[in-house]
């Protein structure tokens, strides 16, 4: 470990030198050593074992953690291996974790509610009562096997649309408001050399695949379909709908096929991840994309200055409708049953939920990138370029639990968070978000262990059929025969059972709330 050997040797030397004089010297306390499987963002390079922030926490808690960091694309397989070996790390940190599987069913996670009742985790527990947060974190057997991660900041949707304002200006174009207008603007981006280099090398649209941040799932919103990764949403009557069965699903695919045929949509969306996507956008040669925000992301400051936010356009006869986010508690941390020192682990985790430590973990050192104002609230002084923060603090990969009321009392949002909030306010005012968030179905409403397991199996069977059909129809075209074939395959794979289980979950949640 980083300091233990040196401290131990120094203490021993003092005893040998002073022992004959009858002087008792206090030894430096031994640091508890723990191990952690740590989630890491795909397009960030973070050395968790050498972050200044964790040195700070080690000094406060006498706990040293050795991290094994795992990229997003490898996280699920790394978790499976960690639990399968029978030699689990002490801690699982960030990413995602199926607590029903590993906690309720397989008993491989430590129930944390029992320790909170005994007074452990005081910083974290003091915020847990706000809203329905405890409900979101409680497993089907009534225990909590995880600590939550929450940044409550009024965010109402995932990816916003951004269009190249420099190109619009160069071609004397207005920001599009309809699908037809957007399609024509994309054609001009391709044909009329808006970057001025004399080549037809412009990429009109750049996306990834199956998500609502940089992915083409967001494009379905132009046809009124709030497609999400679980493929279910709620209509105005409170009925659960299965998105691939809706007419708007086929309409969107027909339009996307047109885009692909005309080389308006980069066909690499099928296979490229967010890191390759970011590399392409950072070349400054893209007309339009969707993303969480512009500042303090994987995009360079030089490139983001070219873009402006754009409201979702609407196809004729439709109202644009993006998936709506609500305050959801993500997975923060869990202790495995191989944990060698539960109390030390909880002490180390709870130190990170102390207000100043927590805000430092996201924003950097007090007196540098983070300032404490006269009113006691913390504010960001500046945001280092090129994600330099990740060289000192874990940012989104660390521990954070800030419900809305508490967060407003202690923090003045940084400029990049105010940027996101402004986009969300714009979209809310424009009425382009689903009325009732599908996240109530997929994340908030409690599921039984049996329901959760069955939905997981059904989704695993349905998703490859849906994504395969999207790839096929975008690349080769939409036909009635293909649509009929897809509908039959989805029914055989259990689409109606999948929808009805979610309806059952929602009806029960409504009755309880």
Image (cartoon, rainbow, N blue to C red):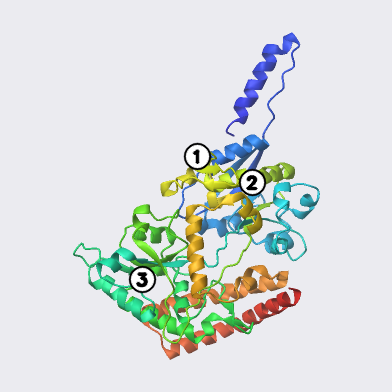
Seen in the picture, residue 85 relative to 196 is either above or below; the reply is above
Work out which quarter of the rendered image holds the C terminus and state it: bottom right
C-alpha span from label 1 to label 3: 43 Å
- Element marked by disc 2: helix
Q: Which residue appears farthest toward the right when viewing the image?
A: 118
Viewer-proximal residue among 179 and 309: 309
Pinpoint residue 339: horizontal percent, then vertical percent: 70, 46
Label 3 Cα neighbours within 10 Å, binned few <14 / some 14-19 / many ≥20: some
Q: Pointer 3 and pointer 2: residues touching (CB < 8 Å)? A: no
Which mark is on residue 267? 3
Question: Residue shown at 29%/72% (left/top)?
Answer: 173
Label 2 Cα neighbours within 10 Å, binned few <14 / some 14-19 / many ≥20: some
Question: Residue shown at 62%/63% (left/top)?
Answer: 328
Pinpoint residue 46: horizontal percent, then vertical percent: 49, 46
C-alpha span from label 2 to label 1: 17 Å
| First of labels 3, 2 by sequence position | 3
- Element marked by disc 3: helix
Residue tagged 2: 355
Q: Pointer 2 and pointer 1: residues touching (CB < 8 Å)? A: no
Q: Pointer 1 and pointer 3: residues touching (CB < 8 Å)? A: no
Residue tagged 1: 368
Seen in the picture, residue 253 relative to 457 is either above or below; the reply is below
Viewer-proximal residue among 126 and 221: 126
């Amino acid at each position: 470990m980083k300091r233990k050997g040196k401290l131990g040797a120094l203490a021993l030397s003092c005893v040998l030198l002073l022992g004959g004089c009858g002087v008792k010297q206090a030894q430096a306390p031994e640091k508890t050593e723990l191990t952690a499987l740590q989630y890491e963002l795909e397009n960030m390079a973070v050395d968790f074992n050498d972050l200044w922030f964790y040195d700070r926490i080690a000094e406060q808690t006498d706990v040293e953690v050795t991290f094994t960091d795992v990229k997003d694309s490898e996280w699920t397989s790394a978790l499976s291996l960690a639990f399968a070996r029978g030699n689990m790390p002490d801690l699982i940190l960030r990413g995602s974790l199926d607590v029903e599987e590993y906690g309720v069913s397989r008993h491989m996670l430590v129930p944390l509610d029992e320790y909170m009742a005994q007074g452990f985790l005081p910083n974290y527990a003091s915020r847990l009562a706000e809203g329905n947060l405890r409900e979101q974190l409680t497993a089907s057997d009534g225990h909590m096997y995880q600590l939550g991660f929450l940044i409550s900041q009024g965010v109402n949707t995932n990816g916003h649309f951004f269009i190249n304002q420099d190109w619009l200006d160069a071609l004397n174009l207005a920001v599009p408001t309809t699908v037809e207008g957007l399609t024509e603007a994309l054609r001009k981006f391709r044909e009329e050399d808006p970057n001025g280099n004399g080549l037809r090398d412009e990429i009109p649209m750049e996306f990834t695949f199956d998500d609502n941040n940089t992915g083409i799932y967001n494009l379905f919103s132009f046809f009124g379909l709030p497609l999400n990764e679980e493929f279910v949403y709620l209509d105005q009557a409170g009925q659960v709908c299965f998105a691939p069965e809706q007419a708007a699903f086929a309409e969107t695919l027909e339009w996307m096929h047109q885009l692909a045929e005309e080389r308006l949509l980069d066909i690499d969306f099928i296979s490229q991840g967010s890191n390759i996507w970011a590399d392409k956008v950072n070349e400054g040669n893209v007309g339009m994309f969707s993303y969480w925000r512009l500042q303090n992301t994987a995009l360079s400051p030089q490139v983001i200055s070219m873009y402006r936010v754009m409201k979702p356009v609407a196809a004729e006869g439709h109202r644009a409708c993006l998936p709506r986010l609500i305050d959801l508690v993500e997975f923060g941390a869990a202790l495995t049953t191989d944990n060698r020192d539960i109390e030390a682990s909880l002490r180390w985790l709870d130190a990170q939920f102390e207000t100043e430590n927590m805000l430092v973990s996201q924003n950097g050192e007090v007196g540098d990138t983070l300032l404490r104002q006269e009113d006691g609230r913390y504010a960001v002084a500046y945001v280092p370029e090129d994600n330099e923060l990740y060289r000192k603090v874990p940012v989104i990969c660390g521990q954070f639990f800030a419900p809305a009321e508490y967060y407003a009392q202690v923090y003045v949002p940084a400029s990049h968070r105010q940027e996101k909030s402004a986009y969300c306010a714009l979209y809310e005012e424009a009425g382009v978000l689903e009325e009732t968030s599908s996240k109530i179905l997929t994340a908030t409403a409690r599921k039984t262990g049996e329901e959760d397991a069955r939905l997981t199996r059904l989704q695993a069977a349905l998703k490859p059929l849906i994504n395969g059909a999207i790839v096929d129809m975008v690349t080769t075209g939409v036909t009635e025969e293909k649509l009929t074939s897809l509908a039959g395959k989805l029914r055989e794979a259990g689409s109606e059972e999948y929808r009805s289980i979610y309806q059952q979950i929602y009806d029960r949640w409504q009755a309880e709330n």
